[in-house]
Amino acid sequence: MSKKTIGIIVGSLRKESFNRSIANYVASVIPTEYEVKFVDIKDVDMFNQDLEDNPPASWTRLREDVKSVDAYLFFTPEYNRSVPAVLKNVLDVASRPYGQNVWAKKPAGIVSVSMGGISAFGANHHLRQSLTFLDVYTLQQPEAYIGNVMELLDEKGALVNENTKNFLKSYVDAFVAWVEKF
């Protein structure tokens, strides 16, 4: 039996992204029975229906990357109480053309990360709304909101807060159990 692959999608393009720091930690505690694949979204052309007859190479690559994984873990910051445009764009690109949504019928989890105290709550729930429409089976409990992230990382961006490490490990355990239901 081959390993299931968990695709990690980080909705921040920033070089020293807090979301990437948390995603790196989470990837390190995913059981070895799973393969982890970071899905690169930094160069995905903006969705434009007019390009669908001759899609950009970045669209084709993204659709294949999304199709190749068995489950998704999304890490999102919050921009203006919603998800970053780059993350919404990859949802749109990989859900097209109509009738060929490669996100559908797979489990997912969401971790929202922010510098503030409300922990990107708005982005987390906007992402859930989009994933529901895309027929993605999103883990409902536990929810993962990581706020005040700058207090949890060292100067190199490594997670050092033991309570957060323990919480994220328990989140991964719940996520893996969720994935196994599919």
Image: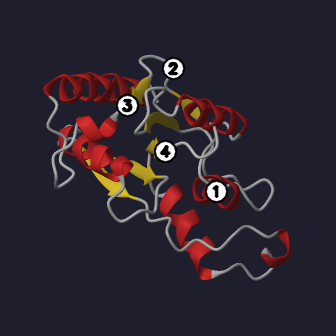
Q: Which residue is mark 3?
A: 146
Q: At 44% across and 52% down in the image, what residue appears?
A: 10
Q: Tell me which label, 1 or 3, sits earlier in the chain.
A: 1
Q: Tell me which label, 2 or 4, sits earlier in the chain.
A: 4
Q: Amino acid at mark 3?
A: Ile
Q: At 28% across and 49% down in the image, what residue appears?
A: 21
Q: Is residue 114 above or below residue 18?
A: above
Q: Tell me which label, 3 or 2, sits earlier in the chain.
A: 2
Tell me the distance, in whole angstroms, between the alpha carbons under discs 2 and 1.
Answer: 24 Å
Residue 105 in percent (x, y) is at: 60, 38
Query: Do the residues bearing badges 1 and 4 touch, measured as CB atoms within 8 Å?
Result: no
Tell me the distance, in whole angstroms, between the alpha carbons under discs 2 and 4.
Answer: 19 Å
Q: Tell me which label, 2 or 1, sits earlier in the chain.
A: 1
Tell me the distance, in whole angstroms, between the alpha carbons under discs 1 and 4.
Answer: 11 Å
Depth check, front residue: 35 or 56: 56
Give the SS element for disc 1.
helix
Tell me the distance, in whole angstroms, between the alpha carbons under discs 4 and 3.
Answer: 10 Å
Point out the frontmost of discs 3 and 2.
3
Label 1: few (<14), some or many (≥20) within 10 Å? few
Q: Amino acid at mark 4?
A: Pro
Label 3: few (<14), some or many (≥20) within 10 Å? many
Q: Which residue is mark 4?
A: 77
Q: Which residue is mark 2?
A: 140
Can you tell which mark lies on residue 85?
A: 1
Q: At 38% across and 31% down in the image, what residue appears?
A: 147
Q: On the image, which quarter does residue 89 sit in?
A: bottom right
Residue 158 in percent (x, y) is at: 17, 48
Q: Is residue 80 above or below residue 44?
A: above
Depth check, front residue: 73 or 101: 73
Point out the frontmost of discs 2 and 4.
4
